[in-house]
Image: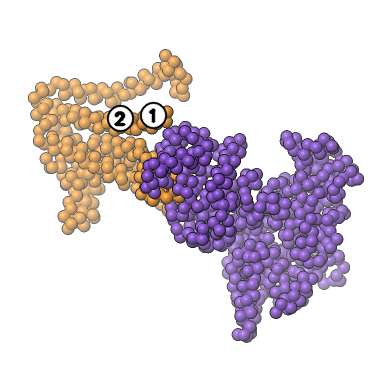
Amino acid sequence: MSITLDQVTKRYQGLPVVNDVSLEIGDGEFFVLLGPSGSGKSTLLRAIAGLTGVDHGRIALHGRDVTHVSARRRGVGLVFQNYALFRHMTVADNIEFALRVRRVRAAERRRRRSELLRLVALEGMDHRLPLQLSGGQQQRVAVARALAHQPEVLLLDEPFGALDAKIREELRRTIRQVQRELGITTVLVTHDQEEAFALADRIGVMNLGRLLEIGRPHELYTRPATRFVATFLGAANLILGRQSHDGIHFGRTAMNAANAGAAAVAHGARTHEVVTVVRPEEVEIAATREALVSGYLAQGTVQEVLFTGVLERARVRVAAELDASLSSGTADGSGLLEVTRPQHEQRAFQILPGQTVAIGVRRIHILPTPLSSFTTCASSESLADALAQEPLLAQLAGRMKTRIGIRIEPRLGMPDALAGNAADFSGTTVIAANPDAAIQLQWLLQRGAQEVLILPQRASAPQRVVIHWADEAVRRATLAVAASILRHVSAEAIYIGILPDQTSRAQRPHGMRALLDARSEAQAVHGLEMRTELRFGDASQELARQLAESPGQMLILGLGSTSRLTERFGSLFAMNPSPLLVVHREHEAAGAGALSRAAT
Amino acid sequence: MSTLHAPSVLPGFGLTFGFTTFFLSAIVLIPLAALVLMVASMHWAEFVRVILSPRALAAYRLSFGASVLAASINLVFGFVIAWTLVRYEFPGRKLIDALIDMPFALPTAVSGIALTSVFAQNGWIGRYLQPLGIKVAYTWIGVTVALTLIGLPFAVRTLQPALLEVQRDLEDAAETLGAGRFYVFRRIILPTVLPALLTGFTLAFARAVGEYGSVIFIAGNLPMKTEITPLLIVIHLEEFDYRGAAALGFVMLVISFAVLLMINLLQAWGRRRLIARTR
């Protein structure tokens, strides 16, 4: 491996800018770190270069641990967005800088310089000053300069940021060519997904300091695992659907998804809400349902048609039956589907704004995220509305690009017969923190709710997410929910394992093992780093004590069984000042429980 | 002709040029001309006797020597201060930044008296220097200290904007290319701020040569030892020897002008060299 990052964390004023990033980059690979501004990608690059120290973790270059080696001894070449050329030196002096520092002989320097100038197609420019060159030429000089000392790794920090589109394209080609010719391991940082696709062997997508997903460009585009990656890598329609054993249902229509099988396994056999990704180019438009080649989704009305040369971009408002389940990747309008059509489709069927059309979908990808949408639930409309306005909830939903629904349950928490349809509670149900929260929670769980968020008033975004599960059987589901939350808030994760006080000495090692298992699963399955702590005592009291320690915490609690819920956790739910997300899996609990018993 | 009618922000070239000449004449040229005129009325032998008297020569040596020394000190420490203020964020930075200007605003006599009381043999600092055999007040060292104090803001204020222009990225780039700190300083930072360094030196030097108020308190004013030229001029004036005073003033004028012209030419040469390489 050329570059190995192991749990690298960098904090700035206490907040993690780079959060537990582990990554391996192979020899000669062109790796692109992609993310919005402030995602920590540049900081990570500077950490690899040695210009920024790390607070935690290890960095190795070609197997050599360089975590505490200064930038000048790391043997990397770095190219900056603003070129950072030495303006009082000629092109030749700039390129030879690293060689002069190393006291290389003049003849050798000259040889190397002309070789590099040929490589970046700037022959004969030796004696110009940087200010006499165009932006593109200056950046070529910067690339040549960074390569002069034959570094093992080339790092590029938004190298095309200051250039216009045409020059950018040209320079992009040059850099790819240089990289291939030298076979040098390269890491490029950018916020431009098109650039990433054009250059990368592999892409790592970063957001809020975390490395969310790594993969080949095509892989990431067609099969993203997270909402963020789905929407950041090009336009995406996110549609909420219901998945059952026979397929995906959107409103009244059902269809098969490409990866329906995998997602079903992840969630157990019950019908549940899922987030699906439909790329604009996978949407088909026809005059009637019969004329569609692909699976029918809904009827719709064309809102807007834009001609952009090769492609036509349209927005189609879907009919009411699907409207509620649409949470568009473009935040500006829900109920609108983005569609792009190539020339031949435009010729075959022309559309105009206002026209009614049938919408079909060629390919659906189901995101394996357990958190689909939020529904606030209260006994009156005003309470449910107020809950939907809570800043933390609005922030979470905004970052997840999902909707917040409202549901009024006048008999919430009241002891009556289980009349409602269990499947009715989909996504995450949100209730306000109150003394009766435990009773309401039990009421909801008995009616099929799988994730319930108990939200105190004006809760702030958590800086620490505390994870605990009361039953080993809900470990997987709890971890998946925790990972999903942690992708959308910039917080550290801590898992707390709790053993009863009277645990015998002989059994204590089991507690430790469970802790280590939890940690390795979080890392392996979700790429999630978490601290772990083992405590002894009553689970409810221990968790309450942890939450009382400092503000800005959130608890994710996995529950396998709802029996004696109020006795076990009543006090925790009643007086807890932090947001609390309960993950409940009854069916899975039975199955996985049997499995773990078989294993031991 | 076109330059005379080129539009500009200020009204009319004629008016502004007229004002410039008038202003310069009234406050710079005419008084200086009067000085030269006064000197011209002297006999040659008398002129030579006054300006080459041992006492005068000692005064020149002290005035220009201490000024060059003070400007050099300001160059080094002004650079350090400017660097600190530009590069680091620390509590009290704004306060220190404001303090730099104090010598501008303080009446020079006040700073002179303050320095004397601090550096005198029983002063706060002087009493600790005394056992080491260092006497500051009433020696040439005291003169240099006073001149350093009043020249400091000139050095710092000219260097600050220049240092702001040295981007961090340049240093980072040099570091990844393998350069050590000293190498980066010598090859990257210094060349970039060199013009500002020269300007800062010039200003601090010019200010020091003309300084009178703060020095006379700390110098002790012993003839041949700690007597600066401006003081010698005042002594001549007090003896109603206007011509002698004018002669000494004339010498200062010539030397100062020569030094400033030299530095300006040096800077112009540096600029031209850069432009020539740009062509």
Q: Chain of mark 2?
A: B
Which of the 4 image quadrants contains residue B159?
top left
Residue B66, placed above or below residue A510: above
Residue A495 in picture, x, y percent from top left:
62, 69
Measuring from the top left, give residue A529's x and y in whole percent: 60, 64
x and y, in percent, of residue A271 in the image = 82, 63
Is any part of residue A374 visible from this angle? no
Q: Which residue is mark 1?
A: B276
Mark 1 is surrounded, within 10 Å at the Cα level, by few (under 14), some (14 to 19) or many (20 or more) other residues, namely: few
Q: Is residue A83 left or right of residue B124?
A: right
- Left or right for A419, reference A562: right
In screen coordinates, is A429 left or right of A556? right
The image shows residue A367, relative to residue B275, as above or below, that is below
Residue A539 in the image: x percent, y percent? 66, 76
Q: Which chain is purple?
A: A
Residue situated in front as seen by the camera: B124 or A471: A471
Residue depicted at x 48% and y 50%: A151
**Chain with orange colouring:** B
How many numbered dots are placed on residues in this image? 2
Within 10 Å of disc 2 (Cα), the crowding (few <14, some 14-19, many 20+) is few
Residue B265 tag number: 2
Of the residues shown, which amino acid type is indicated by label 1? Ala
The scheme the figure's colours follow is by chain
